[in-house]
Image (cartoon, rainbow, N blue to C red):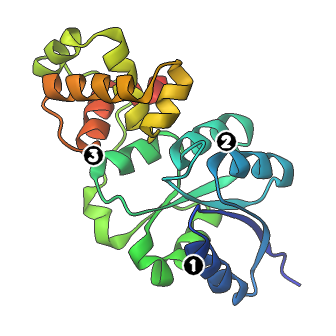
Amino acid sequence: MTKKARIVLADDHPIFLAGLRNLIQREGDFEIVGEATSGTAALSLIREKRPDIVALDISMPGLNGIRVARKLADECPAVRILLLTLHEDRAYITQALQVGVRGYVLKRSAAGSLLPALRAVLTGGLYIDPTIASNVVPPARGHRRHGTNATLVSELTAREEEVLKLTALGLSAKEIATQLGVGVKSVETFKARASEKAGLRTRADIVRFAATQGWLEDL
């Protein structure tokens, strides 16, 4: 009898999580050994169960999927990681690859892509959702962009830079405020000032900017 692959699922949307469970339970080669609805709970569960593979949502409370993946790379390197997300931006994909993620699947195509992705990752492959495969760029470790962006960074205060870094990692204003020991309004002010200085309008802009500075590797 073929050994089933042990999998942990993590997503903070119960309906989507139930859909993943139903999809996987229909297959004979997987065994769900745990489920979590926050990044913190997912990390604890993975440490306990040591599954073969995990399917993580990027945007989760506590720790986002990228931060969980970063910790797993150090603590549980044998666990293979697949991310589920709404984000199609190249910066997110690059960030995921930098921390060792081997599968990147869009939620809107999970019904058709999840199982092939899981099987590809389990056999040592790399799976990027076909819809966004053309967005993939090799992660450039240690790269720092000079010129205009370097000038912009020099204009940021230490607190503004810190808030941008944490925003790029997916933390909410409330989570950043708790981590830095300041008020939510202060966080929003730092973020607004930094975004204005750097010409950033969306979260994707902030992630892209952070990636070009190498901040995502340092955190």
Question: Is residue 158 visible in the rendered structure shown here?
Answer: yes
In this orientation, which residue lies closer to the viewer: 109 or 130?
Answer: 109
Question: Where 67 sits versus 180, above or below?
Answer: below
Earlier residue among tags 2 and 1: 2
Real-space Cα separation, disc 3 to disc 1, in angstroms: 28 Å
Q: Report whether 4 appears left or right of 93.
A: right
Question: Where 95 sits versus 34, above or below?
Answer: above
Residue indicated by mark 1: 115
Please rate how many residues cluster around mark 1, counting C-alpha atoms within 10 Å: few if below 14, some from 14 to 19, many from 20. some
Q: Report whether 159 appears left or right of 102.
A: left
Which residue type does callout 2 highlight?
Leu
Earlier residue among tags 3 and 1: 1
Q: Residue 204 placed where, x, y %?
A: 27, 46
Quarter of the rendering containing residue 165: top left
Residue indicated by mark 3: 204
Q: Secondary structure at mark 1?
A: helix
Q: Which mark is residue 219?
A: none
Quadrant of image for the N terminus: bottom right
In this orientation, which residue lies closer to the viewer: 97 or 43?
Answer: 43
Question: Is residue 142 visible in the rendered structure shown here?
Answer: no
Q: Residue 111 placed where, x, y %?
A: 49, 83
Q: Secondary structure at mark 2?
A: helix
Q: State the residue at coordinates (38%, 36%).
A: 168
Quarter of the rendering containing residue 125: bottom right
Q: Residue 170 placed where, x, y %?
A: 44, 42
Residue indicated by mark 2: 72
Which residue type does callout 1 highlight?
Leu
Q: State the residue at coordinates (22%, 16%).
A: 153
